[in-house]
Protein backbone atom coordinates (compact mmCIF):
# COMPACT_ATOMS: atom_id res chain seq x y z
CA UNK A 1 0.00 0.00 0.00
CA UNK A 2 3.04 2.31 0.07
CA UNK A 3 2.32 2.86 -3.61
CA UNK A 4 -0.71 4.95 -2.67
CA UNK A 5 1.41 7.36 -0.67
CA UNK A 6 4.13 7.45 -3.31
CA UNK A 7 1.65 8.55 -5.98
CA UNK A 8 1.06 11.76 -4.01
CA UNK A 9 4.67 12.90 -4.45
CA UNK A 10 7.86 12.81 -2.48
CA UNK A 11 6.14 13.47 0.83
CA UNK A 12 8.21 16.61 1.48
CA UNK A 13 5.59 19.23 0.69
CA UNK A 14 5.64 22.26 2.98
CA UNK A 15 3.03 22.13 5.70
CA UNK A 16 1.48 25.37 4.44
CA UNK A 17 0.82 23.78 1.05
CA UNK A 18 -0.82 20.74 2.66
CA UNK A 19 -2.91 22.99 4.86
CA UNK A 20 -4.19 24.89 1.83
CA UNK A 21 -4.97 21.63 0.01
CA UNK A 22 -7.06 20.39 2.93
CA UNK A 23 -9.00 23.59 3.57
CA UNK A 24 -11.80 22.83 1.03
CA UNK A 25 -12.23 19.35 2.47
CA UNK A 26 -12.30 20.66 6.02
CA UNK A 27 -15.04 23.15 5.06
CA UNK A 28 -17.13 20.42 3.44
CA UNK A 29 -16.55 17.98 6.30
CA UNK A 30 -17.83 20.54 8.77
CA UNK A 31 -21.17 20.58 6.92
CA UNK A 32 -21.26 16.77 6.84
CA UNK A 33 -20.44 16.51 10.55
CA UNK A 34 -23.21 18.94 11.40
CA UNK A 35 -25.74 16.66 9.77
CA UNK A 36 -24.27 13.33 10.95
CA UNK A 37 -25.44 10.68 10.96
CA UNK A 38 -26.70 11.66 7.51
CA UNK A 39 -28.66 8.54 6.52
CA UNK A 40 -32.26 9.55 5.93
CA UNK A 41 -34.70 8.46 8.62
CA UNK A 42 -38.35 7.48 8.73
CA UNK A 43 -40.44 8.04 5.63
CA UNK A 44 -37.56 9.64 3.76
CA UNK A 45 -35.46 6.50 4.21
CA UNK A 46 -38.30 4.27 3.00
CA UNK A 47 -38.93 6.51 -0.01
CA UNK A 48 -35.23 6.59 -0.90
CA UNK A 49 -34.98 2.81 -0.63
CA UNK A 50 -37.97 2.20 -2.90
CA UNK A 51 -36.87 4.77 -5.48
CA UNK A 52 -33.43 3.16 -5.69
CA UNK A 53 -34.91 -0.36 -5.79
CA UNK A 54 -37.39 0.43 -8.58
CA UNK A 55 -34.83 2.33 -10.68
CA UNK A 56 -32.25 -0.45 -10.29
CA UNK A 57 -34.79 -3.12 -11.23
CA UNK A 58 -35.94 -1.22 -14.31
CA UNK A 59 -32.34 -0.56 -15.35
CA UNK A 60 -31.42 -4.23 -15.01
CA UNK A 61 -34.39 -5.30 -17.13
CA UNK A 62 -33.58 -2.69 -19.79
CA UNK A 63 -29.91 -3.69 -19.84
CA UNK A 64 -30.43 -7.46 -20.06
CA UNK A 65 -29.46 -7.74 -23.77
CA UNK A 66 -26.36 -5.60 -23.16
CA UNK A 67 -25.45 -7.64 -20.07
CA UNK A 68 -25.66 -10.83 -22.10
CA UNK A 69 -23.43 -9.45 -24.86
CA UNK A 70 -20.83 -8.26 -22.34
CA UNK A 71 -20.84 -11.63 -20.58
CA UNK A 72 -20.28 -13.47 -23.86
CA UNK A 73 -17.46 -11.08 -24.88
CA UNK A 74 -15.67 -11.55 -21.55
CA UNK A 75 -16.03 -15.33 -21.64
CA UNK A 76 -14.79 -15.66 -25.22
CA UNK A 77 -11.76 -13.37 -24.91
CA UNK A 78 -10.17 -14.16 -21.54
CA UNK A 79 -9.85 -16.92 -19.00
CA UNK A 80 -11.85 -16.61 -15.81
CA UNK A 81 -15.33 -15.74 -14.52
CA UNK A 82 -17.58 -13.12 -16.06
CA UNK A 83 -18.31 -11.38 -12.77
CA UNK A 84 -15.72 -10.12 -10.34
CA UNK A 85 -16.56 -9.85 -6.64
CA UNK A 86 -14.68 -7.88 -4.05
CA UNK A 87 -15.18 -6.75 -0.46
CA UNK A 88 -15.90 -3.03 -0.06
CA UNK A 89 -16.60 -0.74 2.89
CA UNK A 90 -20.22 0.40 3.06
CA UNK A 91 -22.42 2.59 5.19
CA UNK A 92 -21.28 3.50 8.70
CA UNK A 93 -24.43 3.62 10.85
CA UNK A 94 -22.60 4.42 14.07
CA UNK A 95 -23.23 7.70 15.86
CA UNK A 96 -20.07 9.82 15.58
CA UNK A 97 -18.05 9.99 18.77
CA UNK A 98 -19.81 7.04 20.43
CA UNK A 99 -17.83 3.80 20.46
CA UNK A 100 -19.88 1.82 22.94
CA UNK A 101 -22.58 0.95 20.45
CA UNK A 102 -20.35 -1.04 18.15
CA UNK A 103 -18.45 -3.59 20.22
CA UNK A 104 -19.56 -6.34 17.83
CA UNK A 105 -16.89 -5.28 15.36
CA UNK A 106 -13.51 -6.75 16.18
CA UNK A 107 -11.89 -4.55 13.53
CA UNK A 108 -13.02 -1.03 12.70
CA UNK A 109 -13.30 -1.15 8.91
CA UNK A 110 -14.94 2.27 8.79
CA UNK A 111 -18.33 0.91 7.72
CA UNK A 112 -20.29 -2.27 7.12
CA UNK A 113 -18.43 -4.53 4.66
CA UNK A 114 -20.27 -5.97 1.69
CA UNK A 115 -19.50 -7.81 -1.55
CA UNK A 116 -19.56 -5.67 -4.67
CA UNK A 117 -20.29 -7.05 -8.16
CA UNK A 118 -18.51 -5.93 -11.33
CA UNK A 119 -17.86 -7.29 -14.78
CA UNK A 120 -14.29 -8.61 -14.75
CA UNK A 121 -12.07 -6.16 -16.62
CA UNK A 122 -8.66 -7.56 -15.61
CA UNK A 123 -6.88 -10.84 -16.06
CA UNK A 124 -7.34 -13.49 -13.40
CA UNK A 125 -5.08 -13.03 -10.33
CA UNK A 126 -4.17 -9.53 -11.55
CA UNK A 127 -3.08 -8.43 -8.07
CA UNK A 128 -1.25 -11.58 -7.10
CA UNK A 129 2.16 -9.93 -7.29
CA UNK A 130 1.20 -6.36 -6.42
CA UNK A 131 -1.54 -6.48 -3.83
CA UNK A 132 -4.27 -3.83 -3.79
CA UNK A 133 -3.21 -0.96 -6.07
CA UNK A 134 -5.00 1.53 -8.28
CA UNK A 135 -5.37 0.79 -11.96
CA UNK A 136 -3.43 3.05 -14.31
CA UNK A 137 -4.35 4.40 -17.75
CA UNK A 138 -2.33 1.81 -19.69
CA UNK A 139 -2.49 -0.91 -17.06
CA UNK A 140 -1.27 -4.21 -18.60
CA UNK A 141 -3.54 -6.17 -16.25
CA UNK A 142 -6.65 -4.87 -18.06
CA UNK A 143 -7.99 -7.09 -20.84
CA UNK A 144 -8.95 -5.64 -24.27
CA UNK A 145 -12.65 -6.09 -23.52
CA UNK A 146 -12.09 -4.80 -20.00
CA UNK A 147 -10.51 -1.62 -21.35
CA UNK A 148 -13.62 -0.92 -23.43
CA UNK A 149 -15.88 -1.63 -20.46
CA UNK A 150 -13.91 0.68 -18.18
CA UNK A 151 -13.89 3.51 -20.71
CA UNK A 152 -17.69 3.52 -20.79
CA UNK A 153 -18.07 2.46 -17.10
CA UNK A 154 -19.99 -0.63 -18.27
CA UNK A 155 -18.13 -2.81 -15.79
CA UNK A 156 -20.14 -1.11 -13.02
CA UNK A 157 -23.59 -2.21 -14.27
CA UNK A 158 -23.74 -5.39 -12.09
CA UNK A 159 -23.70 -3.12 -9.04
CA UNK A 160 -27.40 -2.62 -9.70
CA UNK A 161 -27.64 -5.96 -7.87
CA UNK A 162 -26.02 -4.30 -4.85
CA UNK A 163 -28.68 -1.58 -5.06
CA UNK A 164 -31.43 -4.21 -5.09
CA UNK A 165 -29.85 -5.81 -2.02
CA UNK A 166 -29.86 -2.47 -0.20
CA UNK A 167 -26.06 -2.29 0.10
CA UNK A 168 -25.68 0.63 -2.31
CA UNK A 169 -27.66 3.47 -3.81
CA UNK A 170 -27.48 4.57 -7.42
CA UNK A 171 -25.95 7.87 -6.25
CA UNK A 172 -23.42 8.16 -3.43
CA UNK A 173 -19.70 8.09 -2.63
CA UNK A 174 -17.85 5.24 -4.35
CA UNK A 175 -17.03 2.36 -1.95
CA UNK A 176 -13.40 1.39 -1.43
CA UNK A 177 -11.64 -1.81 -0.42
CA UNK A 178 -10.87 -2.22 3.31
CA UNK A 179 -7.09 -2.22 2.79
CA UNK A 180 -7.12 0.92 0.65
CA UNK A 181 -9.73 2.52 2.93
CA UNK A 182 -7.41 2.03 5.92
CA UNK A 183 -4.50 3.55 4.00
CA UNK A 184 -6.49 6.57 2.83
CA UNK A 185 -7.96 7.12 6.28
CA UNK A 186 -4.41 7.45 7.57
CA UNK A 187 -3.59 10.16 4.99
CA UNK A 188 -6.90 12.06 4.83
CA UNK A 189 -8.58 12.72 8.19
CA UNK A 190 -11.95 13.50 6.62
CA UNK A 191 -12.05 10.35 4.50
CA UNK A 192 -14.24 8.28 6.92
CA UNK A 193 -16.96 10.95 6.77
CA UNK A 194 -17.84 9.67 3.31
CA UNK A 195 -19.29 6.57 4.98
CA UNK A 196 -22.13 8.60 6.51
CA UNK A 197 -24.04 7.94 3.26
CA UNK A 198 -24.65 4.71 1.39
CA UNK A 199 -22.08 4.15 -1.34
CA UNK A 200 -23.24 4.65 -4.90
CA UNK A 201 -22.63 3.55 -8.48
CA UNK A 202 -22.20 7.17 -9.54
CA UNK A 203 -21.80 10.36 -7.59
CA UNK A 204 -20.87 14.02 -7.59
CA UNK A 205 -17.19 13.08 -7.53
CA UNK A 206 -17.55 10.72 -10.49
CA UNK A 207 -19.20 13.27 -12.78
CA UNK A 208 -16.62 15.93 -11.91
CA UNK A 209 -13.35 13.99 -11.67
CA UNK A 210 -11.47 11.13 -13.31
CA UNK A 211 -10.31 7.81 -11.87
CA UNK A 212 -7.91 8.11 -8.92
CA UNK A 213 -4.25 8.48 -9.81
CA UNK A 214 -2.90 10.06 -6.62
CA UNK A 215 -3.81 11.14 -3.10
CA UNK A 216 -4.57 14.60 -4.46
CA UNK A 217 -7.25 13.04 -6.66
CA UNK A 218 -8.74 11.33 -3.61
CA UNK A 219 -8.72 14.60 -1.65
CA UNK A 220 -10.60 16.28 -4.49
CA UNK A 221 -13.18 13.48 -4.57
CA UNK A 222 -13.60 13.59 -0.78
CA UNK A 223 -14.49 17.27 -1.13
CA UNK A 224 -17.13 16.43 -3.72
CA UNK A 225 -18.47 13.51 -1.64
CA UNK A 226 -18.86 15.63 1.47
CA UNK A 227 -20.48 18.39 -0.56
CA UNK A 228 -23.00 15.83 -1.83
CA UNK A 229 -23.69 14.49 1.66
CA UNK A 230 -24.28 18.01 2.93
CA UNK A 231 -26.96 18.84 0.35
CA UNK A 232 -28.27 15.49 -0.89
CA UNK A 233 -31.90 15.11 -1.83
CA UNK A 234 -33.99 13.26 -4.39
CA UNK A 235 -33.60 16.12 -6.85
CA UNK A 236 -29.84 16.20 -6.34
CA UNK A 237 -29.71 12.47 -7.06
CA UNK A 238 -31.76 12.94 -10.25
CA UNK A 239 -29.45 15.76 -11.36
CA UNK A 240 -26.36 13.59 -10.82
CA UNK A 241 -27.97 10.64 -12.66
CA UNK A 242 -28.71 12.85 -15.66
CA UNK A 243 -25.21 14.31 -15.66
CA UNK A 244 -23.77 10.79 -15.55
CA UNK A 245 -25.16 10.05 -19.02
CA UNK A 246 -22.78 12.36 -20.98
CA UNK A 247 -19.90 11.31 -18.71
CA UNK A 248 -20.45 7.69 -19.77
CA UNK A 249 -21.05 8.25 -23.48
CA UNK A 250 -18.26 10.80 -23.89
CA UNK A 251 -15.85 8.63 -21.84
CA UNK A 252 -14.98 11.46 -19.48
CA UNK A 253 -12.48 10.43 -16.83
CA UNK A 254 -12.56 6.72 -17.69
CA UNK A 255 -9.83 4.42 -18.98
Image (cartoon, helix red, strand yellow):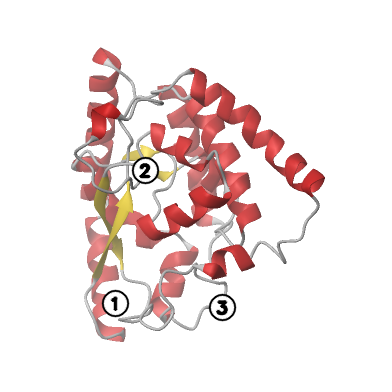
Q: Along the horizontal axis of the image, is 196 left or right of 29? A: left
Q: Which element type, helix, strand or loop, lies under badge 1?
A: helix
Q: Which element type, helix, strand or loop, lies under badge 2?
A: loop
Q: Along the horizontal axis of the image, is 95 left or right of 32? A: left
Single out the mark in the foreground, 1 or 2: 2
Nearest the eye: 58 or 30:
30
**Alpha carbon distance from label 1 to label 2:** 33 Å
Q: Which mark is residue 74?
A: 1
* Total labels drawn: 3
Location of residue 43 by image quarter: top left
The structure residue drawn at horizontal position 29% and vertical position 49%, both measured from the top left corner, is 107
Q: Along the horizontal axis of the image, is 205 left or right of 103? A: right
Q: Earlier in the sequence, mark 1 or mark 3?
A: 1
**Alpha carbon distance from label 3 to label 2:** 31 Å
Q: Are marks 1 and 3 in contact (CB under 8 Å)?
A: no
The structure residue drawn at horizontal position 53% and vertical position 33%, both measured from the top left corner, is 226
Tag 2 residue: 110
Q: Earlier in the sequence, mark 1 or mark 2?
A: 1
Vertical position of residue 24 compared to residue 87: above or below: above
Location of residue 227 by image quarter: top right
Instruction: Tell me residue 245's x, y (percent).
Output: 48, 46
| Residue positioned most to the top | 43
Tag 3 residue: 138
Instruction: Tell me residue 110's x, y (percent).
Output: 37, 43
Instruction: Tell me residue 128's x, y (percent).
Output: 35, 81
Label 3, residues with CA under 10 Å away: few <14, some 14-19, many ≥20: few
Amino acid sequence: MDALAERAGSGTEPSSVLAKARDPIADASADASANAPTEARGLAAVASRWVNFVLALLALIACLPLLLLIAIAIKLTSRGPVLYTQERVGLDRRIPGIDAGNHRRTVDLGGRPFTIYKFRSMSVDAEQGTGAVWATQNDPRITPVGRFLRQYRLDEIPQLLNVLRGEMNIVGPRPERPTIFAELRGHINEYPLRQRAKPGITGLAQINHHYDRSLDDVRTKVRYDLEYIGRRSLWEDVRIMLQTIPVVFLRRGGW
